[in-house]
Each structure stands twice: as C-alpha cells, then as structure tokens.
Image (tube, rainbow, N blue to C red):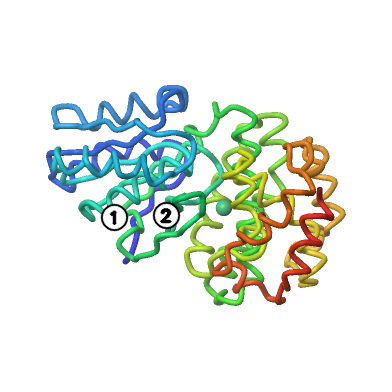
Amino acid sequence: MIQIEYIGEGAIGKLKEVVASFALKKIFLVTGTASYAASGAQQPVEDALFGLEVLHYTDFGALPVQEDIDKGIVAYNAFGPSLVIATGGGHVMDIAKAINYFAGKKPLIAIPTTAGSGSEATRFAVVYKDGLKTSLESPEILPAVAIVDPALAQSVPKKVALASGLDALAQSIESLWSLQASEESKGYAKAALELVWNNIIPAIEERDKEAIGQVMLGAHLAGKAINISKTTACHALSYGLTYRFGIPHGVAVAVFLPAIIRFNNVLLPEPSVTPEAVERLLSQLGIINLSQFGVKATDIPSLAAEVNLERLGNNPRVLTHADIVRLYTEIL
Ligand SMILES: [Fe+2]
C-alpha cells in the first residue's frame, strides 16, 4: 500500500482538501487531550471537519493498552465511521491504528504532533496486552495519508520531546543494522540518523524551531525505515521497562544504545555516532541508568524473561540469555 505524504511547515493546511477528497461524511477522530489544543492541531482539524459528523475519541491513557482499544472498538462500531483521523504522539497513532484495524479498516489520516515515533509511516501498531508488548502488523495498518507539519511539534513538553527524539535516534540506528534492512530502508535510515543526530540537542534543549523540524522529518524517515526493516535489540529489551516502570518508550530504548552499539560493532554511516558520544548525549539529557527510574537488580530476571524475541531476532548479532542479563545489569 502506498501512502500519500504532505511534509513540511504548513502541511496541516492540506487537511481540509484531503478530507474533502475522500468525500466521506463520518469521521472517527482520535486525539490526545491536552496535546490536541496545545499542538495547534485542533483548529485546523475542526476547520477541516466542519459540517461533517465526527466522533471524537480521547478515552485512553498514555500507553496503548488492549482495554482502551476494546472501548474504542465499541464506540467505533456504534458510530460506523467511513474515515479515521489520528493526531497526537505515538500512542495516539497506535490506539487509532489498532481500533481501526480490528473494527473497520477505513482510510486513516495520521497527523503526528511529536517529533519521534514515526508511527504515521508504519504498518505496525504497538499494543500492550496482559502486561506484554505485542505488535499488530498488516499493510492495512499503514495510514493512507501522513501529514507531517513541524509547526505541530513546537509546543510539546520537554519530557515528551526528549523521549520522542530518542526513539527516532534509536529507530534510525537499529534500522541500519537490522537483518531485515534493504537498500531502500538503509537510505531512509541514513538520512534519518543524520537529521536526528545533528539536531536533537538544539531541538530538545533550546527548543530551536528549525531543529525541531529537522528531528520531525528525521523521525518520519526513521518510521519509513523501520516499516521495512523493523527494530532490533534496543527495542526488544525496552518494553518491560515502559510497561512496568513507566519509563517513556524513547528513553527505554535509548538507554541500551551505547551498549548495543558496542555489542553489535557495526560501522554506522555517521562516524560520530560512537557509544561514547551516545553516552554523553544521554547524560547531557539527564539519563544515567535504570536505577534512577526505580529498577532494581531483583527485577532483572523477570525483565530478561520478558524480552521481545521477535524484534531480538532482527539484531545482527545473536544475544544469549546471559548477554541480556549482562546488558540490563551494566546499565542498572
Ligand atoms: Fe520505537
């Protein structure tokens, strides 16, 4: 399935035309709560949907959990939408993709308001079910349209900008060395890494407008890259940290980057992306170890037992159970 993309400052202005082009009257709109207005998405979305029948779904938390998806499916089915619009961060995209996949498989317009997950460009949806991360995967999950407008990511709180930027960084690096990488995915990932790596600090620390735009474009390209290659060890090891300790997804993946760059020993196309440089970046952003998030040595056996084996299988070097325990212990 081919996706139509509108990328760049002012891209959100295309929404009205895009919605009109579908000529569909019932819209299932999925957004965050505070972020919807704060991002600046609300006004253009309301303008674009003026006069149409809209069910606005916001009844979910910060993680895409099956219970919230089930509630959404009930609301979706009762409403019977013909088009779905999702605007928000990665979890909003995941929720919208999962509900739409299970309930109706209608065209989805994805409008990210963070510079990070790249979810608007992927055929996956993360769902946490019974305490474990699962991933839905289908060509039908890929949004029909992605509108990536840097203006919408300018107001995200620093914590969110940090986690999303680090997710994009990890996704671009993991995509490059994934066993499922192709020439096409490597092209996206290389461009993504360059954009994210060179702009992440000014984007987060200085809220530099241009840098935020570059990270957002990089995040989108990283999304296109992992849509082909999928992610690898950092993601595989991260999910328990997010689900059980509330560590934001991007932080939970990035804490493993220095150790996994060392372990994989793959030459990256940005030679300045060394384990030491990533360590410096993380400490500059206040991320030192897992203990600061409340993880204890006694948690490691169960975290290691819950590692996502599917994503781990894409890593260029095999990780044994002992390697996994050592990696958690090293960054404790
Ligand atoms: Fe991710």
Residue 34 position, x and y percent, is 45, 23
Asked if 259 appears above or below 209 in the picture, the reply is below
Q: Residue at x 72, y 49 (%)?
A: 299
**Horizontally, is 110 left or right of 238 in the view?**
left
**Amino acid type, callout 2:** Ala
Q: Quadrant of residue 42?
A: top left
**Horizontally, is 30 left or right of 94 in the view?**
left
Looking at the image, can residue 306 be seen? yes
Crowding at mark 2 (Cα within 10 Å: few <14, some 14-19, many 20+): many
Q: Nearer the viewer, residue 244 or 156?
A: 244
Q: Quick one: label 2 or label 1, which is nearer the N terminus?
A: 1
Q: Please give the label number shown on residue 183.
A: none
Q: Are marks 2 and 1 in contact (CB under 8 Å)?
A: yes
Q: How many marks?
A: 2
Crowding at mark 1 (Cα within 10 Å: few <14, some 14-19, many 20+): many
- Residue at label 1? 101
**Amino acid type, callout 1:** Tyr
Residue 106 position, x and y percent, is 21, 52
Asked if 286 appears above or below 123 in the picture, the reply is above
Q: Which secondary structure, mark 1? A: helix
Asked if 197 appears above or below 78 in the picture, the reply is below
Q: Which secondary structure, mark 2? A: strand
- Residue at label 2? 125
Residue 137 position, x and y percent, is 39, 64
Q: Residue at x 51, y 57 (%)?
A: 223
Residue 242 position, x and y percent, is 60, 45
